[in-house]
Amino acid sequence: MENINLDISRLEDSLESAAFLVSKGDSAKEAHAEIVKALVILNEIRSFGVQSTGTSSVSKRKETRMDFESREINKVTRRLGLWAKRQDQINAKILNAYLKLEQSGTPVVTQKMLHAQLPGEASFETNFLQMRIIAKKNHGKLFDLYGDQVTIWPPVEYAVRKYEKAVG
């Protein structure tokens, strides 16, 4: 229940931020990103929260989450194969930028550094968000974000390293 309350709090913050940006009138891109973020959080609440079937069993929710993560790992593995062949896709560009920073010996990769690698990509924020979450229609969860530090999501590390070898 504590996680649901935390997610609801995150959802409120995102919606507040989006409402503020909309009221300013000149931040449509940022407002859009906040609304997408809020929708993702709402989806997480639906997926991991108490189910409408009346089941509130903790073990049932854990099984659902594990199944959800397993499906996500399979999705990412499939998509990495496609991105290896389609290097012009934004998802491949973001992952390649991360790998390039990592290979350069940078001790920590930050979101700001990653974004700087792709200065011409107007849709970076929205696509990067879709690569950090588990949701029905995301791009595939590849990254975790801790503050501004970006890391590979541990369950897909092996698949990412195979991708890295495939693209050189």
Image (tube, helix red, strand yellow):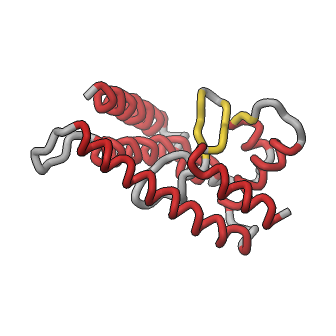
Q: Which quadrant would residue 9 be assigned to in this image?
A: top left
Q: Position of residue 82 (x, y in %)?
A: 65, 72
- 41 over 81 or under it: above or below: above
Q: Quadrant of the C terminus?
A: bottom right
Q: 44 or 17, which is in the foreground?
A: 44
- 4 over 142 or under it: above or below: above
The residue shown at (56%, 48%) is 155
Count of picture labels: 0
Q: Which quadrant would residue 106 be assigned to in this image?
A: top right
Q: Quadrant of the N terminus?
A: top left
Q: Position of residue 50 (x, y in %)?
A: 20, 40
User: Of all residues shown, which one is farthest toward the right?
Assistant: 104
- 4 over 160 or under it: above or below: above
Q: 35 or 163, which is in the foreground?
A: 163
Q: Position of residue 52 (x, y in %)?
A: 14, 48
Residue 71 falls left or right of residue 116:
left
The residue shown at (81%, 30%) is 107
The residue shown at (65%, 30%) is 148
The residue shown at (43%, 37%) is 18
Q: 35 or 143, which is in the foreground?
A: 143
Residue 138 falls left or right of residue 79:
left
